[in-house]
Image: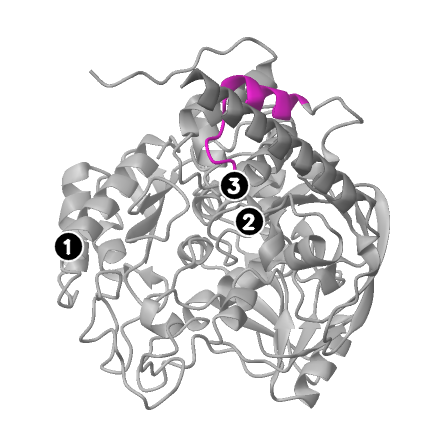
């Protein structure tokens, strides 16, 4: 039995080495020049993605999401519903969180896009990424890039004093908002997590905003 | 998605000029609804004219003319920008709240004010191209009539269409007696009172509103009012956020002591257009602002409702929501 598990561990280890090499190859490939098979109504757009200028020939129908995933090798942003209902494709364009699945790449000429791949600085994670890791703000991880991009932009909105539907009095001049659990739930409602990691996501966002240690609020039933 | 030509427009007259040249073209603003409809093959334009570069995004107080003291909001200003603008938050908190009740933060960042008014119904039979739908394909019939019509209209529907109009923002604009400013193909400007902008389905459910082909929404005019201290937007939905309304109510009161000197009530989720509760308004004008009076007025308004097989619950819900919204407006707090 012991022997078998050791063998299994060895197998796993060799698998990981293989995966590492695979990833290394993928990064080395010159993916920008992958030619699209067929383009109708083609047009060339210049978009800054994660502070790198990209010039790409696209079909007029191409969404920003598909352009990033299929043409730029940036597969961090996820295609969940492709209809603006789940938020997995959330990216930050010129400082604002938007849905890349409902954004035509053709409308992004001259704009600056930040994706999950652009949040870390070298090897230092964005504080929101760190907080999600610490609080285990995910299970399967598919919605996570969208959740994190959304939460990063939310920090700016809160700082600017933007109101939400549950703001008690929108007439009051609020310089900046410290987000309660309810406020985070309301303001993050555009990002669906089918695993239901919401309590941990809320805790992560709270910790990233306050910089203070946040206790997780979930409890085991019974 | 079907192929289409993508054109960017530099000015409003140029955009209109491009649109009228091609009967199958469409304006593209925020795209949150149009692109989805194109992916579903419900909308099939062969040319999109992008309005993203047009300078129609300002929100300004009106200082001259017949609307002095009011405000004008740009047709292409984003929903988020509009809801958070100090002028709107201070003078039209009802509008801020209604915008913030709709969609998600991401969608409000993309969606424009003009586009919000022009969004199509979310009737699931309209979206499903395998089903008959008089709004999508005139003359094919209404699948919702005999279908699962829990989300559908209780006021003003016809045998041809029972869809409801989905916007929250428009419910507040109806209550505020806004006007829609449009530029016409010949360059003229037309001001459409809000009650005449959206329409009931009648025999032509394919027409959501009274805009003519080639007209472009440049702004929305908000008249001056004294409702800011006493208004509320209440939205009832299947989940707490990011869902369309089952029923919503925009309520605004102007009080003279405890007497109602002006009142506005508009409902969402109940008709093919924002539904002004004119009967309830007439009953309340000049009366004491009490919950008992609110209940009488709400009951009178709902008397003319005609429910379908699965949406009779909207009658009680509508009545209770009107009372709740008026109670909140009276209290003057803006909590949900």
Choose top left, top right, bottom left or bottom right for residue A58: bottom right
Q: Badge 2 is on which residue?
A: B108
- Label annotation for residue A142: 3
Q: Badge 1 is on which residue?
A: B313
What secondary structure is marked by label 1? helix
Asked whether the residues under the numbered discs 1 and 3 touch, taking CB atoms below 8 Å apart as contact, a structural biologist would say no
Q: State which chain disc 1 sits on.
A: B
Q: Nearer the viewer, mark 1 or mark 3?
A: 3
Do marks 1 and 2 both belong to one polypeptide chain? yes
Answer yes or no: is residue A121 visible: yes
Q: How many marks?
A: 3
Q: In the rendered image of this protein, does residue A124 appear above or below residue B32?
A: above
Callout 1: 10 Å neighbours few (<14), some, many (20+)?
few
The residue shown at (56%, 66%) is B35
Answer yes or no: is residue A157 visible: no
For the record, the magenta segment spans: A127-142
Do marks 1 and 3 both belong to one polypeptide chain? no
Quick check: A39 left or right of B303? right
- Label annotation for residue A160: none
In the picture as drawn, the residue positioned furthest to the top comes out as: A213
Give the position of the C terminus of chain A as an image quadrant: top left
Give the position of the N terminus of chain A as an image quadrant: top left
Q: In the rendered image of this protein, does residue B78 appear above or below residue A147?
A: below
Q: Nearer the viewer, mark 3 or mark 2?
A: 3
Separation of marks 1 and 2 at Cα, in angstroms: 30 Å
């Amino acid at each position: 039995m012991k022997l078998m598990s050791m063998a299994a561990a060895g197998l796993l280890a060799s698998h990981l080495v293989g995966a590492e090499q695979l990833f290394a190859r993928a990064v080395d490939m010159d993916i920008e020049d992958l030619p699209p098979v067929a383009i109708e109504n083609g047009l060339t757009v210049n978009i800054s993605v994660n502070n790198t200028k990209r010039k790409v020939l696209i079909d007029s129908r191409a969404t920003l999401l598909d352009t990033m995933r299929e043409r730029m090798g940036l597969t961090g942003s996820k295609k969940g519903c492709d209809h603006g209902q789940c938020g997995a494709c959330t990216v930050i364009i010129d400082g604002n969180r938007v849905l890349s699945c409902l954004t035509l790449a053709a409308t992004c000429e001259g704009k600056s896009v930040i994706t999950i791949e652009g949040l870390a600085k070298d090897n230092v994670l964005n504080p929101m990424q760190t907080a999600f890791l610490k609080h285990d703000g995910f299970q399967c991880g598919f919605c996570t890039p969208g959740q994190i991009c959304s939460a990063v932009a939310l920090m700016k909105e809160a700082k600017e004093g933007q109101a939400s539907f549950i703001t008690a009095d929108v007439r009051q001049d609020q310089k900046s908002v410290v987000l309660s659990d309810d406020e985070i739930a309301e303001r993050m409602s555009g990002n669906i997590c089918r695993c239901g990691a919401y309590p941990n996501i809320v805790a992560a966002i709270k910790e990233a905003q306050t910089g203070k240690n946040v206790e997780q609020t979930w409890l085991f039933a019974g | 998605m079907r192929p289409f030509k993508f054109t960017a427009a530099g000015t409003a007259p140029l955009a209109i000029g491009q649109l009228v040249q091609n009967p199958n073209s469409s304006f593209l603003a925020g795209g949150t609804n149009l692109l989805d409809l194109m992916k579903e093959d419900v909308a099939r334009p062969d040319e999109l004219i992008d309005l993203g570069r047009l300078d129609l995004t300002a929100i300004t107080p009106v200082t001259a003319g017949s609307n002095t003291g009011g405000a004008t909001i740009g047709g292409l200003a984003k929903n988020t920008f509009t809801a958070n603008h100090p002028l709107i938050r201070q003078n039209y908190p009802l509008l801020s709240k209604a915008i913030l009740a709709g969609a998600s933060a991401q969608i409000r960042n993309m969606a424009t004010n003009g586009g919000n008014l022009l969004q199509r119904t979310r009737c699931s039979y309209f979206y499903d191209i395998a089903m008959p739908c008089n709004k999508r394909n005139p003359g094919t019939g209404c699948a919702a009539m005999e279908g699962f019509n829990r989300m559908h209209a209780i006021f003003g529907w016809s045998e041809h269409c029972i869809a409801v109009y989905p916007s929250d923002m428009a419910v507040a604009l109806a209550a505020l007696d806004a006007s829609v400013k449009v530029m016409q193909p010949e360059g003229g400007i037309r001001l459409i009172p809000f009650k005449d902008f959206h329409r009931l389905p009648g025999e032509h459910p394919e027409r959501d509103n009274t805009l003519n082909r080639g007209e472009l929404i440049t702004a929305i005019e908000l008249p001056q009012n004294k409702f800011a201290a006493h208004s509320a937007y209440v939205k009832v939905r299947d989940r707490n956020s990011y869902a369309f309304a089952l029923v919503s109510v925009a309520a605004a009161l102007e009080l003279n002591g405890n007497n109602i000197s002006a009142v506005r009530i508009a409902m969402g989720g109940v008709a093919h257009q924002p539904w002004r509760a004119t009967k309830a308004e007439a009953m309340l004008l000049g009366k004491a602002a009490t919950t008992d009076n609110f209940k009488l007025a709400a009951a009178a308004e709902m008397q003319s409702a005609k429910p379908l097989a699965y949406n009779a619950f909207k009658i009680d819900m509508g009545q209770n929501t009107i009372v709740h919204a008026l109670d909140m407006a009276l209290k003057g707090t803006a909590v949900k």
